[in-house]
Amino acid sequence: MEKILWLIFTTLIAPACASSNGSLDGGPDAGPVEFCYNVRPYTRGDTSNFPVIPKSTAREPAAGQCLADPNFHTTLCKAVDHKEFPAAEIDNVVRPVYSRWSAVNSDGTLYYLVKDGETPAGSGRGQMVIRKTSGDSLHRIVTEVSSDESAEFRWDMSGQHPARLYYREDCQLRSYDASTGQTALVHDFAREFAGCGRILNDVEGDASADSRYFAFMVQGPYDGENFPMRAIVTYDRVQDRVLGTLDLARYRALGGTGDLPRPNMVDMSPLGTKVVALFPRNDKNDAFDGPHAFDLDFSNPVKVCNDESHSGWAFGAGGEELFVCQVTNSNWPNAPADTLAATDIRTGQTTVVLFHEDLGWDVGGFHFGRFYDPAIRGWFFMSTYSDTASSQSFLRNQLVMVEIKPFDQHPRIWRIGDTHNRYPGPDGYPREAYSPISPDGRIVLWGADWPGGDGTVDTYRIDLPERWWQAIESGPICP
């Protein structure tokens, strides 16, 4: 699809040149915007470094059109518009599923989105759409199986099968071939758990960065009110075996009382060294009081956040795995309430990076990304969502990189771009601008309801410079 650059404050529409490396036309690698890093150091209690950027009045672009932003010095493009699909197969949303795993595959050629409709209409299938990263054209609609967010599709990131995805169905982990549409059984957990009702990470979790290690909750059949918890397991896909089981007996051995609690989600660390169970706070100061990172046999629990808040993953300066989260109250001595913090999952050492108060209480929420490559060190990625009509925060509705340093060492904040998102709109959930980042740290996708547009949620994209985490040290830095 030919890309068109649409300049802010003008009505000039002109063709933009295609980048030789497949990035979007008009992006930082090739295009008419003068790219620079819109980065400034943060100081606790002083936000004068971060002027509030005026709200954009640009009209909504069509699919394939790109918008050069002179405030952020980046270019965004509308990757996919809901209008592409027949009205019977979509309502008004096509977007990335969530922020905590990559929508882009291991070789950077494909990505997937979810729409709020089925193909064929009424079939219960075809919710997921696979696109080509080059030109954002349609690769295929997943019509063979139910593919909404509850199916928990994840790319094979081993580098050996770039067209393969994994998904859950009842008690089975299965694979899907994005080239042929064929499916196959990977493992049936009813082998270990007779009478199993379903397995799930509960949408927000991911496998290890090499797709070897998975974590699942195992639940019994629906009893009219819920799916009873049976266990949490870690699974080695290469050896096809369960590595660790946190069942009621193991829970009690670790000091738990009562029934086995249901975490908000379960998640493998990027390098597969730990499994995080996002337990809610219970104020008992035990291994189940808030999110904990366990070894894969469910030993050595390390507390990594205070409660089941939004979270993501990053790597520290030494390559250590860091669990990044929004600390929501004062029940954790590692970090004060209302901060953004990163915790080493092996040592439990926490770095308090930012204070919500400084970012503005009118920032309604944060969603965090996940880095796969340990070479991407010392930064975490997040998006924000705020009430479009009233928010005055300097971080309202933006895509952001944050340097991982203690707040008193002035971590840098790179404001990448405006999400151009009308939040909350008629339905807030799909308008939270979930923005997964690709495994190479370059492609950012998100869903947005463009203010003043047609009222639907479409998918937008920004491409970042190659190895930006190194290039940012030499600039150019925006004036």
Image (tube, grey):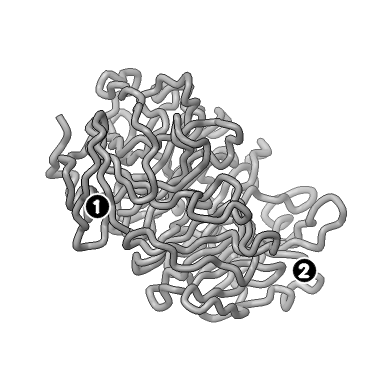
Asked whether the viewer can see residue 323, the reply is no
What residue do we see at 33% from left, 41% from top?
401
3D distance between C-alphas at marks 1 and 2: 49 Å
Element type where label 1 sits in the image: loop
Label 2 is placed on what type of residue?
A: Cys
Q: Position of residue 58 (x, y in %)?
A: 34, 31
Q: Position of residue 135 (x, y in %)?
A: 33, 60
Q: Which residue is mark 1?
A: 25
What residue do we see at 74% from left, 53% from top?
260
* Total number of numbered discs in the rendering: 2
Q: Is residue 206 left or right of residue 39?
A: right
What residue do we see at 45% from left, 49% from top?
81
Q: In front: 402, or 141?
A: 141
- The image quadrant of residue 356 is top left
Relative to 84, say whether 352 is above or below.
above
Element type where label 2 sits in the image: loop
Q: In front: 7, or 475?
A: 7
Q: Which residue is mark 2?
A: 196
What residue do we see at 52% from left, 40% from top?
456
Q: Is residue 66 left or right of residue 364?
A: left
Q: Position of residue 276 (x, y in %)?
A: 55, 54
